[in-house]
Each structure stands twice: as structure tokens, then as C-alpha cells.
Image: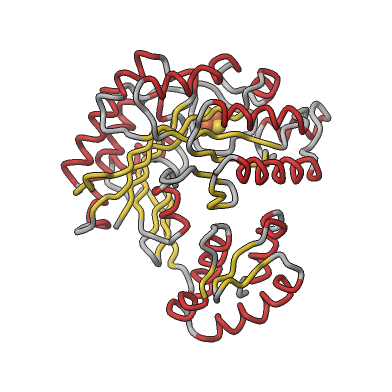
């Protein structure tokens, strides 16, 4: 089983909180897409003999691609890889790009899942974050995508936004339910250094994220999931039956994936590789036949820490059996000792030798994981 990620490094405008790699210039767009196809060919051996179960167009803004560009890329993928008959093929899309004609043209491509970056149904939040769409577009896009035939879709929402109080956050969540959205990814706003938001907080233009309010939003989110038959299958991800994201789950299960395009990451079970986060440097490297990535071989400690971090965040938790199979016994002993206090504080529970976060524990998942790490 393997997975392919393509990073489309273009955006219409820069969101104020974003620290992903993208460019608002469309200069060299054709050349970069061609370079990505060259990279695909050069690195296809890393997944040789494996069938692609998922293909994920992330970014940046993949919905900036025309349906012809998407078809061209998917045809190229098809010439180099074997693609599973029921492969999940996801396109990240912004509401302002999803016109009815674009949605219709997407239906003529193999894309079968949309990840729509709504983030909020309120104009004041969208303006504050400098999103390119309006609340009206956020409202209409889900129904229009469903009408066009995209039953498998997910929506992103951000909580912890300054000015978003509990009742406004509840209304955003209620819209998810009213629109019959089958999968939700929801993240707390984080103010990353070097973003416009970091500047705004520094200059006092906006208030920093209120941790107490963000925790309350997260509690509301958990409650919302319970009341509306969403499985809370990963800290930030919620799915109705049969709508768990296969591509994202592959990251949490440590499966191998190949990442193509500027800033894309790859993993083969022991080596992590990451491409240069600069469109021109990427283009130049491909044109002169140089490597586009740096790499590191994970040590046993790093593999264990990553296993703990990713599995702890999911509803499937950490199984003692798997820990013992994957790592030398001292890791299991370390885990057993360190987990005791979190079990005693009821942040972690042991369900027939599978360790899973409790609702209380989900609020401090990172703290618990780092405590269980081997350093
Ligand atoms: S659209 Fe996405 S990738 Fe582009 S700036 Fe906004 S958050 Fe970042």
C-alpha cells in the first residue's frame, strides 16, 4: 500500500495565519508543473511494485489548477504507477475557486473527494484571516459541490479565532450538520512566527489566541461530534461512518508515501525526505538534475517517538502488542512506566492493552505524548 502527495505551490492571496509553502505569483507555473512531473518520473522507483491507494493534491491551493492541468497530472501519474481501482483522490479546494462550471469540469477528472477550506462561515473571521472567499460563498459551496456529485467531501474549520465566541463557534458547527457534511477537520488557530498574524499580535492589532477559550471550543467540538454521530477518530478529524480519510490516516499509521513538488515530504518507513521550500530553487534543481530534497534516517528513538505521537492522537490508540513487535522491549517498559501517571489521572485509559486518550486527555495530547517519548 502506498500513497502520493502533490504540493501545488500557488495561492491567490496570502492568508494571515499561513506558514505553508506557497507563492502568490503564477510565474513559471507551467514550468513548475512540468518539473513536478519530471520529479514524479525520477522518484517513482521509491514506490515500485506498490499500488497507489490514495492521491492527495495539497498546497498551496490545488483548486487553482484547471481541470485540464489536473487531467494532465493524473494521466502522468497513471503512466508511472498502478492506481487502485477505488483509490481515494482528494483535491484541496478553496470556496472561491469552486464555481459551478469548475465543479462540473472536476467531475470529468478522477478526483473523487474534495477538501474544502471554509475555515469559518462568518465574514469577520474570513476578513481577519485574509481568506479569499466570503461567508456567502462558504454557505453555498457545500450544497453546490454535493449537487455536482461530490458526496465524499470534507470541510476545514478553524477555532480559537480572536472574536469568535462560544455561541458563534456553535453556529459554525451547526452549519456543518445542517449542510450534511460527512467529514470535518478542525484546528485551533496557531500564531506561527513570520506570519502576518504574528506581526499583528506583536503590534497589538489583534489579541493573542486565548488558550482557555480555545480549549472550550475544543470541548464544544467533541460534544458536537458526539451529538451528531461523527466519529472523533483523530484529535483534529471527525468522520461519519465510511468517511474516514484514507490518505491522512496513512500518515498516522506510518505507511509509506511519496511527496512531489516544492516543500513536499516523503517517508518510506525509515527515511524522511523533504523538498526545498522555494519554487525557483526547486525548478533549478530539477532542470540541472540535482536532488530536490534533504533526508534523514530516523533513529530507533525517533521512530518510537513518532509512533507514539501519531497513534496516541487516534481513536485506535497505542497497542502493547504492536509496541512490542515494532520496538525492543526497553521501549515497552519505558512506555508502561511513563503511562502510569496518565492512567491514574484519567487522561489515558487502558482498554484490553490498547492505550487510548480519554476526553480529558485529548485536551493535552501533545503534553502526554512528549512525556511518553524516549529521549
Ligand atoms: S489558501 Fe491555504 S496555503 Fe494558501 S495562503 Fe491560505 S492557508 Fe495558506
Query: Where is residue 326 shown, x and y percent of the image?
Result: 44, 76
In this image, 302 relative to 125: left or right? left
The single residue placed furthest to the right in the displayed view is: 204
Q: Closest to the observer: 184 or 328?
A: 184
The single residue placed furthest to the left in the displayed view is: 79
Q: Closest to the observer: 279 or 332?
A: 332
Name the residue at 46% across, 75% down.
322
Name the residue at 39% across, 58% down.
267
State the scheme by which the image is colored: secondary structure
* Residue 317, quarter of the rendered image: bottom right
Residue 70, placed above or below residue 79: above
In this image, 235 relative to 23: left or right? right
* Residue 350, quarter of the rendered image: bottom right
Query: Where is residue 253 shown, x and y percent of the image?
Result: 44, 60
Quarter placement of the N terminus? bottom left
Residue 13, placed above or below residue 78: above
Amino acid at each position: 500500500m502506498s500513497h502520493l502527495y502533490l504540493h501545488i505551490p500557488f495561492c491567490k492571496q496570502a492568508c494571515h495565519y499561513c506558514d505553508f509553502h506557497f507563492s502568490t505569483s503564477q510565474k513559471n507555473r507551467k514550468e513548475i508543473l512540468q518539473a513536478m512531473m519530471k520529479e514524479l518520473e525520477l522518484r517513482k522507483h521509491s514506490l515500485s511494485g506498490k499500488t497507489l491507494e490514495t492521491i492527495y493534491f495539497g498546497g498551496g491551493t490545488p483548486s487553482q489548477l484547471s481541470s485540464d492541468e489536473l487531467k494532465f497530472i493524473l494521466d502522468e501519474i497513471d503512466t508511472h504507477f498502478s492506481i487502485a481501482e477505488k483509490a481515494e483522490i482528494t483535491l484541496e479546494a478553496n470556496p472561491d475557486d469552486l464555481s459551478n462550471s469548475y465543479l462540473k469540469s472536476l467531475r470529468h477528472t478522477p478526483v473523487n473527494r474534495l477538501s474544502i477550506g471554509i475555515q469559518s462561515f462568518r465574514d469577520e473571521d474570513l476578513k481577519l484571516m485574509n481568506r479569499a472567499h466570503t461567508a456567502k460563498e462558504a454557505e453555498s459551496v457545500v450544497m453546490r459541490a454535493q449537487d455536482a456529485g461530490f458526496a465524499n467531501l470534507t470541510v476545514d474549520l478553524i477555532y480559537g479565532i480572536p472574536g469568535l465566541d462560544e455561541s458563534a463557534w456553535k453556529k459554525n458547527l451547526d452549519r456543518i450538520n445542517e449542510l450534511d457534511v460527512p467529514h470535518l477537520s478542525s484546528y485551533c488557530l496557531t500564531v506561527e512566527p513570520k506570519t502576518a498574524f504574528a506581526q499583528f499580535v506583536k503590534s497589538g492589532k489583534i489579541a493573542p489566541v486565548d488558550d482557555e477559550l480555545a480549549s472550550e471550543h475544543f470541548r464544544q467540538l467533541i460534544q458536537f461530534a458526539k451529538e451528531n454521530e461523527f466519529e472523533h477518530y483523530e484529535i483534529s478529524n471527525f468522520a461519519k461512518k465510511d468517511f474516514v480519510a484514507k490518505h491522512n490516516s496513512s500518515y498516522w499509521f506510518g505507511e509509506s508515501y511519496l511527496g512531489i513538488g516544492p516543500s513536499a515530504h516523503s517517508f518510506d518507513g525509515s527515511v524522511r525526505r523533504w523538498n526545498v521550500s522555494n519554487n525557483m530553487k526547486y525548478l533549478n534543481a530539477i532542470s540541472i538534475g540535482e536532488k530536490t530534497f534533504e533526508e534523514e534516517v530516523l533513529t530507533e528513538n525517533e521512530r518510537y517517538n513518532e509512533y507514539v505521537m501519531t497513534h496516541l492522537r487516534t481513536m485506535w490508540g497505542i497497542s502493547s502488542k504492536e509496541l512490542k513487535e515494532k520496538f525492543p522491549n526497553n521501549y515497552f517498559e519505558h512506555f508502561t512506566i511513563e503511562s502510569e501517571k496518565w492512567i491514574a489521572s484519567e487522561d489515558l485509559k487502558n482498554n484490553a492493552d490498547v492505550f487510548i486518550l480519554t476526553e480529558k486527555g485529548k485536551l493535552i495530547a501533545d503534553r502526554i505524548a512528549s512525556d511518553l517519548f524516549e529521549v
